Image: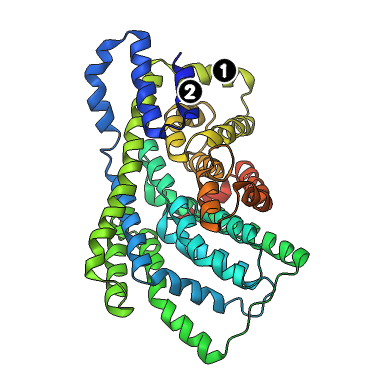
Amino acid sequence: MVLTAFITLLLLGLPIAFVLLVTAIGYIVSTENFGLFSSFPQQFFGGIEAYGLLAIPLFMLAGEFMNEGGLTKRLVRMASVFVCGFKGGLAYVNLIANMMMASIMGSAIAQIAVMSKVMVPEMEKEGYDRAYAGALTAAGGLLSPIIPPSMLFVIYGVLAQIAIGDMFIAGIIPGLLMAGGFFLTITLIGFKYNYPKTSKVSFSEAKKLVLMGLPSSAIPLVIIGGILLGVATPTESASVAIVTAFIIGKFVYKELRVQHIGRILFNTALNSSAIVFMIAAANLLGWALIFEQLPQMIAGWLSSLSSNPLIFMLLVNAGLLVVGMVIDGIAALIMVVPILLPIATDVYGIDPYHFGVVVCLNLVLGLLTPPVGTGLYVAATMARVSPTAIFKALLPFLIVSILVLLLLIWQPSLITYLPSKM
């Protein structure tokens, strides 16, 4: 009954946070455990009391200040200098700019929306297919939850009770592997469709663009540098990034206006509150599932199938690919981690950082796959083309992402090496 209600509400298009909340209530009613309602408020608010979750609105606010203060567009212009004269050069610019923004925004949906506004019209002017431009921008959004900082990593770190900073570091090599795979894909597609070369710029113009973009590049340096050097937590790094973005936007580029701050704060509050409400609702449903001893049942079933950690990881990821197609990545993460992480670490001896990066990357793919595919629809809306056209152009990048995912499952050291050395 509870599963039927969950699927029905999901298909009706109810926001995922309300689906989770109503399903949790439905479970209590169907099992007649009405005494659980006394713990309802405690479990609801308990899911969002973790200090690490404060990083989510702070990173969002840093991204808003960057967009409003002109930092984002200058990063894009600086990126264009490094691919002058390359065939399909603007596609490389798109990906490089997405890598820079991934180290700031931490949200794939926000990144796809922001970068689509900037890159799709520019690529269309240069003769690129609009669907390909939108697909490439959406693919770049896949880097956001992997290259630190990452909202999914923050939430996973809180759920797994591990250091969020180490989780960020664990995502560096996987993020670079993803980016490298995307660069190779762009090169092959560029040869096939004979996309135009970017026009060369003079040395003086290139110097000017780099100098104008350097202040913007201070933001990722502040975030990643503070964490790597151990002088700041992710939450503290996000706070410093906000101040830095404000100073650069207001006093260096002089595009940030004081009268815009109200709207910036409102947008940040609106977007972050939706995520926090989802976390609280998902915590309720996870609590109900744990009360029903679902993790123990799943652990027993998986153990009966195989005692091999590699087989376990392949089975889990096959299931998560399906889950990610119908449930938002954040909600899915909150639902599956309390159930699967204890099995992974206690039964199969899998490193929690390895498990976390693989699960987060897996669930991110769901952003760009039907039937839910929030990122897919955002990219289609921004590019003004059909989701089907975006998805077709996106397929090579999704294949590369799955290949990287399989490589990370097979070679855990690609994830665990850097955290072990810090």
Residue pushed farthest right? 192
| Residue, disc 2 | 8
> In this view of the protein, which residue sits in the foreground, 306 or 377?
377
Q: Position of residue 403 (x, y in %)?
A: 67, 47
Give the color scheme: rainbow, by chain, secondary structure or one colour.
rainbow
Give the x, y percent position of residue 168: 43, 52
Nearest to N terminus: mark 2 or mark 1: 2
Residue in front for this viewpoint, 9 or 27 = 9
Q: Is residue 127 above or below residue 162?
A: below
Q: Is residue 112 left or right of residue 261?
A: right
Q: Judging from the image, what secondary structure is the residue with disc 2 in?
A: helix
Does any portion of residue 51 appear in the rendered image?
Answer: yes
Describe residue 223's horizontal placement relative to residue 339 as left or right: left
The residue tagged 1 is 301
Tell me the residue at 63%/82% (across/down): 199
At 40% from the left and 34% from the top, the residue drawn is 15
* Quarter occupied by residue 23: top left
Q: What amino acid is found at the position of numbered circle 1 in the picture?
A: Trp
Q: In the shown orientation, is residue 123 left or right of residue 21?
A: right
Of the residues shown, which amino acid type is indicated by label 2? Answer: Thr
